[in-house]
Each structure stands twice: as structure tokens, then as C-alpha cells.
Amino acid sequence: MGFTPKKKDSIKETIKNHLLNGNIVRYDGRDETPLEVISRDYINNLSRMHNIGQEFGIVVENISCSHNNLYEVINELEAEYSVRKVSCEYSGCCQYSTYGVYLD
């Protein structure tokens, strides 16, 4: 079986599809941490969540990529949709602060 590298666009499409399907994408300021995708069912709990990797049993998918991919998708979606960014209160500070984004 040969290796097939992922194109940058395929990662961006994965992120975009999760948001368009109603999921929440969580991230923090450290680019080496994965993006966490969680179900829209947790919107009301989002502001009380912790750091990336500390919410057990609710993560639909982890996406390992540069966070610039997420920022590009957000900028693209903001032209057509209302994108909400929520700070997760029980996350750390500065680079460790965690945020969740979803479409209204």
C-alpha cells in the first residue's frame, strides 16, 4: 500500500463540512494541538468546557492540521453565514485558551 499525502484543501473541506453539518470545532492558541469536533448537542455546555483533550467521550473527530486551515475556513464561511466563536471558560489562559466555533 502506497502513501498518499493529504492535500491542504481536503483538510479545509473536512473542517468546512463539519461546520456546515452543524458540528462545533474547538481549538486553542497552540498550533500543535488538534482541532476537536464535537456534536452541536453541546452548544449550551461550550462556554463551560476545558482545554483541548480534556472533554472525554464527546469528541467526534480530532483533526491534526495547522490552525490556519480553520481560520481560512471561518473567513470563507463568514461571507455567507453567521459564525459564532465562544470562549471555553474553564480552559487556560493566553495560548491555552480554548474556543469553539459553530454556525448559528
Image (cartoon, grey):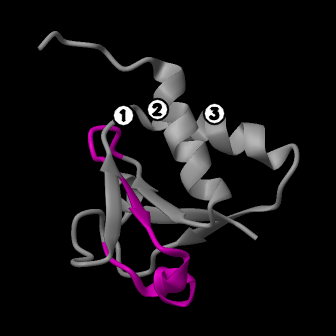
The span shown in magenta is 30-50
Residue depicted at x 44% and y 80%: 89
Label 1 SS = loop
95 up-or-down from 51: above or below: above
Q: Which residue is mark 3?
A: 72
Mark in the foreground, 2 or 3: 2
Residue at left 67%, top 45%? 74
Query: Which of the 4 image quadrants contains residue 58?
Result: bottom left
Between tags 2 and 1, which lies in front? Answer: 2
Crowd tier of the residue under label 2, counting other residues whose Cα lies within 10 Å: few below 14, some 14–19, many 20 or above: some
Residues tagged 2 and 1 counted as in contact (Cβ below 8 A): yes
Residue at screen point 40% across, 48% down: 29
Image location (x, y in percent) of residue 91? 34, 73
User: What residue sits 59% from the left and 62% below the top?
Assistant: 101
60 vs 42, nearest the viewer: 60
**Marker disc for residue 65:** 1
Residue 44 within the magenta-colored segment of the rendering: yes
- Residue placed under numbered mark 2 in the picture: 11
Q: What's the amino acid at mark 3?
A: Glu
Left or right, 97 with reference to 43: left
Q: Is residue 91 placed above or below 10 in the rendered structure?
A: below
Circle 2 sits in a helix, a strand or a loop, which is it?
Answer: helix
